[in-house]
Image (cartoon, coloured by chain):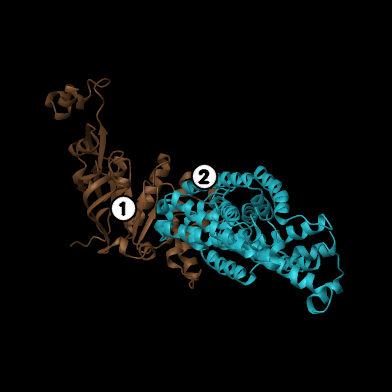
Chain colours: A brown, B cyan
Amino acid sequence: MTASPLSVQDATIGYGRVAISEHLNVDIPEGEFTVILGPNACGKSTLLKALARMLKPSDGRVLLDGKDIHSQPTRAVARRLGLLPQAPIAPDGITVADLVARGRYPHQGILRQWSPEDEQVVAEAMAATDITELAARGVDELSGGQRQRVWIAMVLAQQTPLLLLDEPTTYLDITHQIEVLDLCAKLHREGRTLVAVLHDLNQAARYATHLIAMRDGAVVAEGPPAEIVTAETVHKVFDLPCRIIDDPESGTPLVIPSARARDGENSPSARARDEESSPSARARDLV
Amino acid sequence: MSTAQRARNQAQPTPAGLDSNRGPSESVPQKRTARRVSGILVLTAALAALALLSIAVGSRAMGLPEVWDGLTDRASDAYPVVTELRVPRTILGLAAGAALGLAGALMQAMTRNPLADPGLLGVNTGAAVAVVTASYFIGSFGFAGTISFAFLGAAIAAVACYLIAGASSATPARLALAGAAVTAAGFAYVSAVQLMDAATLDQMRFWSVGSLVNAHVAPMLPVVLLIGVASVIGVLLARPLNALALGDATATGLGVDPRVLRVAGIVVITVLAGTATAVCGPIVFVGLVVPHVVRAFTGPDQNWVLPYSALTGAAFLVAADVLGRVIARPGEVQVGIVCAVFGGPFFLYLVSRRKVARL
């Protein structure tokens, strides 16, 4: 029905008999940088795992290019869809170049071994992530930020038009978070469709071109950040009273959590809450 | 400065300059590949030398001309010893050593556990349980019977481990725990039966220490064929195992189904280790130590680790067997004991010297 290259249709996803999401419908728009966000345990990583075919829906389907992802050969899927999981493992003593080269797996076969084209693609992936100088270094000697760029290079070497990234900024300090997100934005500008799970609302609002906000396994809001990052949506998704201002750097929505009443009686938002007696304020009064 | 030194200094700038122009990204992997290739050649040569040594050396001392007669002249006194005993024994040593080394490397790669060995899949215990049970109920049976029961037991134990670990949802940690549980239960059962029945204990005593002495009565062709076919399939698993080394999730993203790969791995390991154990009895430490030594040299790429482990395993087992024939002349020490005596301390040394490579 849509041009969406990757979609979830009426799917029930979960672990064993525990369903995290029921009757979930999600379309990943082509050419966009989609960010999935929501509070802990909202089902965002589960959704990403379903999109990456790591979890098979117990009901409903995940479609890649209009066909059930689980009915396609997994290596063929790996040439369309790259995945950077949350905690990939680097074998002891592996060099950067060798790790990036492992991204070529879906393009190789028993009869088709390492080729000059593979060499070329790996070199390009390392150049794109600015790790060419690290090629001969051991992955275990690198800093967290460098290591994350190496993993992204490995996924790039897979040469897929679609990239899924599960919390690519977790465990990184703020500088490296921005570095990784800038890299993602560059990959998006170059024409790839990106889907990432992020924790930081403001980073999501700044970098995403399409947001999917989830809570309790369901999609609460969906659309461009400028439209859906509102105080109302943030409250609905995160239970967080806040104000939204324009990010002075990028012009994107910036979420400012309200000061808690105890140490901010006189903050503007606290006063506004009292005056309006918003539903949340009333709810708190009851508790 | 001598003339020769001056000449060298003048000659050097060109190649050195070229080297630095190429940069580390090209020259280092190339150098390492060259090292790995030459390592294979050295290893193959060592293997050939050890095989010849294994034919030439035995508890009965012989001169080289006598050994040559033993190989070529059916009528010579040495023929029964050299061609009918030592040659099959050498072939079995090579096959079983390669099988155990490769099975160990596969087991460690598949479970991402550097301390895994084929025994952890319950292969040794399963074989022992089957042999003990058969001896207890049937009494005495021939060597072919022992091999069949042992192989069957090894296969059943491996399948049991896989099922207990959760079948298709088996994780490396669950496989290791299931293997430990099956091994413990099997060991208790074997000890109990042996304590109850002296005849079983007697029959088991020859089998429960790994040895190559039965090579001349072993069905050599099926043994070599089984190990050969399983080895080829095992080495072909190198690239998916390289993907699996990055974690199950990354492997899935790269187009490897970890569940399918684990099933294939378990089948190959069971055939390799099961065949070796069935014919020789349990030989420990080869599958554990050899892949460690190999990884220290080759690095973590399974394309190299697997063939290297097979060759090194073969060399190690044949060397241990030759040693066992020489140190206690005119008697001999069984190869399983030699492997344990050398493998154990060597493994402790490896573990204490460098941290065990995380996989």
* Residue B28 shows in this picture: no
> Is residue B241 rendered to the left or right of residue B273?
left
Instruction: Locate the C terminus of chain A by quadrant.
Output: top left
A33 and A49: which is toward the camera: A49
Chain hosting mark 1: A
**What kind of element bears circle 2?**
helix
Q: Amino acid at mark 1?
A: Ala
Across and down, in percent, residue A228 comes to 20, 44
Q: Residue tagged by mark 1?
A: A50
Q: Are marks 1 and 2 on the same chain?
A: no
Residue that extends furthest to the left in the rendered view of this protein: A276
Question: On residue A242, which mark appears?
Answer: none
* Residue A173 shows in this picture: yes
Q: Residue tagged by mark 2?
A: B181
C-alpha span from label 1 to label 2: 34 Å
> Is residue A210 rendered to the left or right of residue B103?
left
Across and down, in percent, residue B85 comes to 75, 68
A188 and B202: which is toward the camera: B202
Instruction: Locate the N terminus of chain A by quadrant.
Output: bottom left
Residue at left offset 34%, top offset 55%: A52
B237 and B157: which is toward the camera: B157
Q: Quadrant of residue A68?
A: bottom left
Chain hosting mark 2: B
Q: Is residue B36 above or below residue A272?
A: below
B125 and B355: which is toward the camera: B125
Across and down, in percent, residue B273 comes to 58, 59
